[in-house]
Image (cartoon, rainbow, N blue to C red):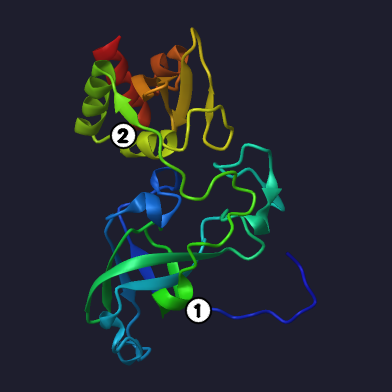
Amino acid sequence: MKTDAPALLLSPIGYMRTAHATKAETPRQPATARDKPGLLQLLPGHHLEHAIEDLATWERIWVIFWFDRNRGWRPKVLPPRSTTGRKGVLATRSPHRPNPLGLSVLRLDRVEGLSLHVRDVDLLDGTPVLDIKPYVAYTDAHPRSGSGWLEQPDPRPAHVVWFGADAELQLAWIAAHAGPPLRERIEATLRLGPQPHPYRRIRRGKDGAMVLAVQDWRIDFRAAAAGIEVLGVRSGYRAAQLDAADATGGPLALHRGFRARFA
């Protein structure tokens, strides 16, 4: 975004180390990342060991970071919780912002030198951290505040999600063959609801079933009064793609093996 104002110079004070390698597997909020561990490694040579004195006495910290893997921004976005269309990006928590600044409140377990051990981490591995502030409960928490365009107070009660026998076998096979952590992503997405939604990549399938897309996998599920049942997992690649001569390595090899096992 161009402006006549002078450029602002920001430099990272550290970087996050987490198990979240891609956007698809990263929780969207700290509330959905409960107990997910991470390490905030501060940079040496900047006197930060003095800057974090007394920080270990706080239970939670605000972490201000840079969405370094975003490209561009969008004036209007479709949040996962929206049932009434797109919203202005500044009325949402979307990462696609005019300035790609992020803000998360993380639980601080301990401080070891320039390493901060934290939990409830919803940041990608390698995310640049710009600042840290203590979370002060009496001034930072306002539980009675209005919820804006959200139809219900946030967070709303999560939908119950369970996995059928076929889905359990398929997810276990994928995990055993070093596939992506599908189960956590499926649960996190479907707990928000089973309604078709382009942002959550949910659409209607056949025979009353629904389909959730997670990376290059497709998950069939069915919604009922008691909750959401995950029926099974299948590859998102077409048969012709899996049969191609160059499908012997990389992710296609995993999908070919899956097809052979669960054909």
Query: Residue 135: horizontal and vertical position, in percent?
Result: 40, 75
Residue, x 22% and y 21% (percent of image)?
169
Q: Would you identify the image quadrant in which residue 189 lies?
A: top left
Amino acid type at circle 1 is Ser
Image height of 258 relative to 80, above or below = above
Residue 188 in view in this figure? yes
| Residue 173: % across, % down | 22, 25
**Quadrant holding the N terminus:** bottom right
Residue sitting nearer the eye, 135 or 237: 135
**Looking at the image, is 135 positioned above or below residue 84?**
below
Mark 1 surroundings within 10 Å by alpha-carbon count, few (fewer than 14), some (14 through 19), many (20 or more):
few
Q: In the rendered image, is residue 12 in sight?
A: no
| Camera-nearest residue between 151 and 92 | 151
For mark 2, what is the residue?
183
Query: Furthest residue to the right?
Result: 4
Q: Is residue 110 above or below residue 152?
A: below
Pinpoint residue 105: horizontal percent, then vertical percent. Answer: 41, 66
* Residue 11 numbered tag: 1
As helix, strand or loop, the secondary structure at mark 2 comes to helix
Residue drawn 59% across the image and 33% down it: 198
